[in-house]
Amino acid sequence: MLHQKLKNKIFVVILASLALAGTGCKKYLEQTPNDSLTKENFFKTRADAIAAIVGVYDGLQACTTTFLNWGEFRGDLVTATTNTDATYVYYQLLDRTRPASNWANVYNMIGRANIVIEAVPQIPAIDSRLSVEESNAIVGEALFLRALGYFYLVRTFKEVPLVLQAPSNDNVTFRIPKSSADTVLNQIESDLLRAEQIIANSYTTVQETKGRATKGAVNALLTDVYMWRAKYQQAW
């Protein structure tokens, strides 16, 4: 009798374990992280769209010194020296420990722009506070910033990887082959021509108009691109 009762208890435990395996594990192992944002649970509101484009501008801030240095180097305005004074900025940049060819910040900005271009157009269908017109204008800003990043890259390094997809999952391949300079420049022109049609002429405050991309900024950059490619008729 004792042996039979023990067998019954074991049988009950096994049944309970199987029940938990079918429901409990799924419940506890498929929880959405509470301490992080994903593409699926972030791009839902107008505030999310604004925050996302601000993030692209934040990425641009990290590129400003890099862009300045690349311009100086292309202009042959930097000379190697034995001066080890820590305040001599150009010596530091020519040092192997501080490579001036590091383009990580630029691709970080481009990656953020790609996310905005892909995700923001879906928000108006979810949040009516973001109109299609405003959504398009935000995408136009991202297109401008992506084009700006690639214009500095192609002028400095000529052939560079052309990344146009958002880094939306762990399977994204980041080490892609370089594209030709003409391919990159063609994409820049395409981005700017599209941005020109949808970006805002100005914003509600002077600070925003001066601090965010406008149609005037797009036209200025597009003219620079045309001049770089000797397309003087288009630049005119």
Image (tube, rainbow, N blue to C red):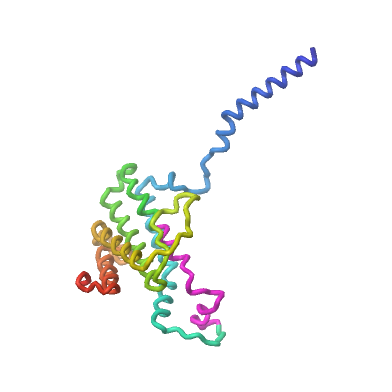
Q: Nearer the viewer, residue 54 or 101?
A: 101
Reply yes or no: does residue 105 show up in magenta.
yes
Picture coordinates of residue 230, whole percent (x, y): 26, 74
Asked where in the image residue 138 lies, by quadrant, the reply is bottom left
- Foreground residue, 59 or 72? 72
Q: Tell me: 215 left or right of 156.
A: left
Q: Position of residue 72 (x, y in %)?
A: 41, 80
> Which residue is most to the top?
1
Q: Is residue 165 above or below residue 24?
A: below
Quadrant in the picture for residue 199: bottom left
Numbered label tally: 0
* Nearer the observer, 174 or 87: 174
Quadrant of the image occupied by residue 95: bottom right
| Residue 81 pos. (x, y %) | 52, 87
Q: Residue at x 37, y 66 (%)?
A: 180
Read off the magenta span: 86-112
Q: Residue furthest bottom?
A: 82
Would residue 68 appear left or right of 96 to someone viewing this image?
left
Give the position of the C terminus as an image quadrant.
bottom left
Residue 86, x across and y down, in percent = 55, 82
Q: Which residue is located at x 42 percent, y 79 percent? A: 73
Query: Residue at position x 57%, y 38% from top?
Result: 29
**Residue 123 vs residue 103, the one in the foreground:** 103
Which quadrant does the N terminus fall into? top right
Residue 133 vs 68, above or below: the answer is: above
Magenta region includes residue 94: yes
